[in-house]
Image: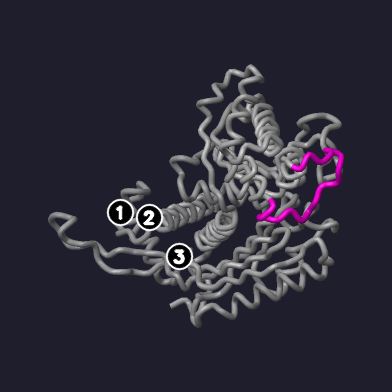
């Protein structure tokens, strides 16, 4: 019995490896799968035959014989787009977006709508999410498969199991049980993640050579967040999603943060903080939750025009961000950073104070050598991170399925 159990575990791991190769590399021949996984030709043949019978993968054609030299052209295998659907949902201060993708990761439907989170009741969140996911599913082409996973990226702290949003600056309500709201309605597993963690996941998927095992994605927007990858794993807290970089203390008893505390990094680097400083408003002034893109554009244009208050606001932001990164480097060593969001438009005013702040800590880190990248739009990264995470979960579900798994009637 022990040996049988081990044999089954090996089979599941091998199925997982083959699905990963197909997801990463697109259509691949059995010979190519064997080369990439190190599995024997007979093992690859047996497992891919199983997966074809289960309609998880399909044969898509033959390789170009001119590229193979001698021998018969190889049949290429690919993921079956109709094997499953996944839903990615992004919940922000003023917007909810839903994206439905097929098993190959191709977007087949989406819905994007303004949503005033600060004014919404818990039931308002529930109704809006259900309505928008249903609307997106109605747009899915007929015969596209069944919904197998839903992943939400939210602005806020989630519990470590990904069931509830414990706290968020976008709403006065706590413990919003999004999993319980959605799972019974759509009969598919639902999980929540902090939006910055999903940004980090997307960057790794897009550019694994650049964003490999150790890096951070820092969101520069109305708030400041971080998704942190260390040793190949996304970092979370013990009981919650953790990595609340924006709420590390920068200056004790300093500027008022929207979390209610004073001196947080976000109280100097968030949009509302930069706007407050640029307007020479007292740092104890209550943070605004309605700073528009146009208002931030005005601050940026003022800095370009030489306005000293605007330039000082960005410099303060850079120092806060740099000091926070230096504190993290003191704990885990230095790592590359991707700054994401509209706040990157002014990075020319932020970068030098940021690097100077890192240097000022006298760590064994050469600030000028920290690898920094900027991405101006967080939305596609959040949705992509949610989609990729959900698809990888479905891969594991198929990898662990038994040969007698009931095949979806529409996955043909």
Gap between marks 1 and 2 measured at Cα: 10 Å
The type of colouring in the image is one colour
Asked if 175 appears above or below 338 in the picture, the reply is: below
Gap between marks 2 and 3 measured at Cα: 11 Å
**Residue visible at 66% across and 36% down?**
311
The mark nearer the N terminus, 1 or 3, is: 1
Task: Using a 10 Å C-alpha cutoff, classify the residue at mark 2 as few (fewer than 14 neighbours), some (14 to 19) or many (20 or more).
Answer: few
Nearer to the camera, 49 or 351: 351
- Read off the magenta span: 279-295
> Does residue 245 show up?
no
Q: Mark 2 points at which residue?
A: 25
Q: Mark 1 points at which residue?
A: 32
Nearer to the camera, 77 or 236: 236
The mark nearer the N terminus, 2 or 3, is: 2
Side of 138 where 267 appears, left or right? right
Instruction: Please tell me whether residue 283 belongs to the stretch shown in magenta.
Output: yes
Residue 104's disc is 3
Tell me the SS state at disc 1.
helix
Instruction: Please tell me whether residue 21 belongs to the stretch shown in magenta.
Output: no
Tell me the SS state at disc 3.
loop
> Does residue 304 show up?
yes
**Residue 86 percent coordinates (x, y):** 57, 67
Task: Using a 10 Å C-alpha cutoff, classify the residue at mark 3 as few (fewer than 14 neighbours), some (14 to 19) or many (20 or more).
Answer: some
């Amino acid at each position: 019995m022990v040996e049988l159990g081990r044999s089954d575990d090996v089979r599941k791991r091998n199925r997982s490896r083959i699905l990963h190769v197909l997801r990463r590399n697109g259509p691949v021949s059995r010979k190519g799968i064997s080369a990439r996984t190190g599995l024997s030709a007979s093992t690859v043949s047996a497992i891919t035959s199983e997966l074809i019978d289960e309609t998880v993968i399909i044969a898509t054609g033959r390789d170009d014989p001119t590229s193979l030299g001698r021998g018969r052209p190889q049949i290429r295998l690919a993921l079956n787009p109709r094997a499953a659907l996944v839903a990615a949902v992004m919940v922000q201060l003023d917007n909810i977006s839903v994206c439905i993708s097929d098993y190959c990761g191709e977007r087949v439907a989406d819905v994007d709508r303004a949503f005033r989170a600060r004014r919404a009741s818990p039931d308002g969140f529930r109704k809006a999410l259900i309505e928008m996911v249903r609307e997106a599913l109605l747009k899915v082409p007929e015969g596209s498969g069944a919904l197998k996973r839903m992943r939400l990226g939210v602005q806020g702290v989630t519990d470590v199991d990904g069931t509830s949003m414990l706290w968020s600056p976008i709403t006065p309500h706590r413990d919003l049980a999004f999993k319980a709201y959605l799972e019974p309605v759509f009969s598919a597993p639902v999980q929540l993640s902090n939006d910055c963690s999903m940004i980090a996941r997307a960057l790794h998927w897009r550019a694994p050579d650049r964003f490999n095992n150790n890096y951070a994605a820092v969101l520069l927007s109305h708030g400041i967040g971080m998704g942190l990858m260390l040793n190949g794993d996304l970092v979370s807290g013990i009981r919650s999603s953790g990595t609340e970089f924006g709420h590390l203390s920068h200056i004790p008893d300093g500027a008022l943060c929207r979390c209610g505390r004073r001196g947080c990094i976000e109280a100097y680097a968030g949009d509302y903080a930069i706007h407050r400083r640029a307007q020479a408003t007292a740092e104890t002034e209550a943070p605004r939750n309605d700073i528009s893109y146009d208002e931030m554009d005005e601050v940026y244009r003022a800095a370009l025009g030489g306005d000293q208050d605007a330039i000082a606001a960005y410099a303060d932001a850079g120092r806060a961000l740099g000091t926070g990164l230096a504190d993290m480097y003191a704990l885990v060593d230095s790592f590359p950073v991707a700054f994401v969001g509209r706040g990157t438009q002014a990075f020319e005013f932020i970068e030098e104070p940021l690097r100077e702040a890192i240097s000022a800590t006298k760590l064994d880190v050469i600030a000028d050598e920290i690898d920094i990248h900027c991405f101006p739009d967080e939305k596609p990264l959040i949705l992509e991170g949610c989609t990729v995470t959900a698809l990888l979960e479905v891969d594991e579900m198929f990898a662990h399925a038994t040969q007698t798994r009931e095949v979806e009637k529409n996955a043909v």
